[in-house]
Structures are given as structure tokens and as C-alpha cells.
Image (spheres, rainbow, N blue to C red):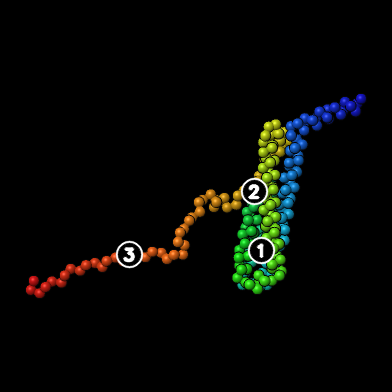
Amino acid sequence: MRLLTRLIPLLLLASLLSGCGYNAIQQKDESVKASWAEVLNQYKRRADLVPNLVNTVQGFATQERQVLTEVTEARSRVGQINVNADDEASLRQFQQAQGELGSALSRLLVVTENYPVLKSDANFRDLQAQLEGTENRITVARGRYIQQVQDYNTYIRSFPQVVTAKIFGYQVKPNFTVENEAQISNAPEVKFNTGAPAPQPAPQPAPQQAPAPQPGG
């Protein structure tokens, strides 16, 4: 009898928590964490490729020291960030550092186009293929994470889950923002006749001179 009197309040509490969305909040929160772990996994995969890629390029193009240094330094900055996905400033710093590394890698691959021997190297081709595959995985992982965060945020801001979220301290999570937001907010500059010579100004007529005075005039 005593066991029954203890179970009844627990069952009532469980039904109340389920009805107010508590269990669903837990599930969605775990889904967000799992998606974030996959994002970190793919970014780490890219960072792990950088040293081998830099060493391979350096073996064929030692004179490209600037771009090689940029890639190495960008990777170092990424490794120094202890990101907290629940903190908007931390997530923004992490995104900026990853964007800088991505840009540096893009410049490195552009430079390699000038070295046919490097492009034909089997090791370089393998590293390039791995990097391209990793970039695709990053895009997919980020997209899934964005969707999970949006789903979670929408759910805990809806009634009655919003009450449960406030009681148990669940807050809206920050999300990835659009990269180069200021740049894409401006209309692109369109130029026609690119590369055509600039029109030359029309020649000005020479000033007329007064007729010379006639002798005896």
C-alpha cells in the first residue's frame, strides 16, 4: 500500500512533465549536441589534413612561403579556440577562425595551379580529394546542425513548452550566421566591356591666332 502511494505521485509527475514537453526538450537538446559533435568532427578532419598538405606543396613550391605561412597560422588559430556552442560570441569567433582557414586553403589551391608537377603528384591529388570531400561533409554537417537548432529553438519558444523551458533553465541556442554578411547585403557591382580600353577624350581644336598686321596698315 505504501509503495502504491509513492508510485501515484511519481506517475502523475511523469505525465505532467511529458504533457508540458519536458521529454521532447531533452530529445531535441540531445539531437543538437549530436549534430554539433559531427560539425566539430568534420572541422577537425580538415585541420588534420592541413600539415600534410602544406608539407607536400612546400616540397614542390618552396617559394610560396607567404600562402603556406597563412595556412599554417590560420590552422593554429583554429586550434587555440575552445568553442562553446551555447555562447553566441564563442560560436561567432569559432566560425570566423574556420572561415579564415577555409579562405587560406582556397588561396593555397589556387597557387598550386601554377605547378603542373605538383598537380600530377599522387600524394597531392589524394590530399586534395580528401580536402574536397571534407569540405562537402562540413557543409552537410553544418546544415544539419542549423536545422536541429532551429527546430529546438522553435519548440522551446512555443506554448506550453516555453514555461517548462523557463522552469528548467533551457534557453534559445545561437546558430551559425551567414558568412560575409556585410558583403552579401550589397548589390554586386556590374561592369560592362571589362578589359576594353578607356575612351580617349576628343582632341580640342587649337586656339585661333589673330592675323599678323600688314605693313603699312
Tell me which corner region of the image, top left, top right, bottom left or bottom right, holds residue 125: bottom right
How far across and how far down the image is residue 33, in percent?
74, 46
Tell me which corner region of the image, top left, top right, bottom left or bottom right, holds residue 25: top right
Asked whether, in this view, residue 209 is left or right of residue 106, the answer is: left
* Residue, disc 2: 176
Sort mark 3 into few (<14), some (14-19) or many (20+) by Cα contacts within 10 Å: few
* Residue, disc 3: 202
Q: Quadrant of the C terminus?
A: bottom left
Tell me which corner region of the image, top left, top right, bottom left or bottom right, holds residue 126: bottom right
Q: CA distance from mark 2 to mark 3?
A: 55 Å
* Residue, disc 1: 72
Q: CA distance from mark 1 to mark 3?
A: 53 Å
Q: Amino acid at mark 1?
A: Thr
Q: Residue at x 65, y 73 (%)?
A: 117
Nearer-the-camera pick, 131 or 25: 131
The nearer-to-camera label among 2 and 3 is 3
Q: Residue furthest right?
A: 1
How far across and how far down the image is residue 60, in percent?
66, 73
- Helix, strand, or loop for circle 3? loop
Q: Is residue 59 visible?
A: yes
Q: Amino acid at mark 3?
A: Ala
Q: Amino acid at mark 2?
A: Phe
- Where is 153 relative to 66, above or below? above
Asked whether, in this view, residue 182 is left or right of residue 216, the answer is: right
Which circle marks residue 149 in the picture? none
Question: Between disc 2 and disc 3, whose residue precedes?
Answer: 2
